[in-house]
Amino acid sequence: MLSGKVPAERFGEVVLPHLVDAMSLARWLTGNAADAEDVVQEACLKAHAGIGTYAGGNARAWLLTIVRNVSYTWLARNRPRNLVVVGDLADLDELSSTREMDAVRADSPEAALIAKTDTAVLEAAIAALPHPFREVLVLRDVNGLNYREIAAMLGVPIGTVMSRLSRARGVLTMRLGAQR
């Protein structure tokens, strides 16, 4: 162990502050909250087992890398390859209702309805992106990782991350613009 702290204490400092981000990433990768909970639980077990080898640095990126790897292992084990996951409607309802309440406080019922519809359209457009584009977009724009962290997680050059992100944003802009 590299630090003088007991594993449980170190786990609390390194992993627990990033569980919301871990759930968010797992939800995007698996497509629904129930599967994401399973993935994050398994990722936490792996993180706890490997906490002694954590050398410092960006704890969030370290945990999200574990979540990403566990997600793909879990998906390979539990989902047929030809199944395309576009998300869990309950997640969209939960996300939309939170944003809708914010919009209702700020504006009229019409504005709330528009915000809810816009959220659902955006979520569906992101879910429809090809996997490499969706993954980079979620890691950057949802989870807020920088290019270097994403490149390290995915094992690709930074230029590839930038290219995929640009293409993902371009496809989203095109799809969302065509719907207006």
Image: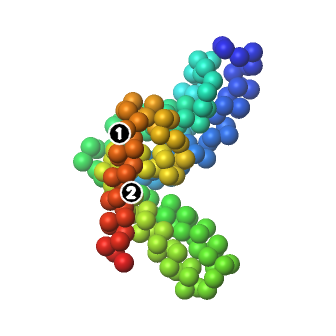
Q: Is residue 87 left or right of residue 21?
A: left
Q: Is residue 158 left or right of residue 3?
A: left
Circle 1 sits in a helix, a strand or a loop, which is it?
helix
Where does residue 117 sit, x and y in percent of width and height? Answer: 46, 75
Q: Does residue 150 appear in the picture of this structure? A: yes
The residue positioned farthest toward the front in the image shown? 159
Q: Residues within 10 Å of mark 1 (few under 14, many from 20)?
A: some
Give the residue pinned by disc 2. Answer: 169
Disc 1 marks a residue whose amino acid type is Thr
Where is 47 relative to 106, above or below?
Answer: above
Q: Residues within 10 Å of mark 2 (few under 14, many from 20)?
A: some
Of the 4 image quadrants, the one containing the C terminus is: bottom left
The residue positioned farthest toward the left in the image shown? 82
Where does residue 172 sit, x and y in percent of width and height? Answer: 36, 61
Where does residue 66 sit, x and y in percent of width and height? Answer: 50, 32
Give the residue pinned by disc 1. Answer: 160
Disc 2 marks a residue whose amino acid type is Arg
CA separation in Å, label 2 and label 1? 14 Å
Residue at the spot 56% in from the left edge and 82% down from the top edge: 111
Please tell me which of labels 2 and 1 falls first in the chain.
1
Of the 4 image quadrants, the one containing the N terminus is: top right
Residue at the spot 39% in from the left edge and 57% down from the top edge: 169
Circle 2 sits in a helix, a strand or a loop, which is it?
helix
Where, by quadrant of the figure, is residue 129 drawn?
bottom left
Count of numbered tags: 2
Residue at the spot 66% in from the left edge and 31% down from the top edge: 14
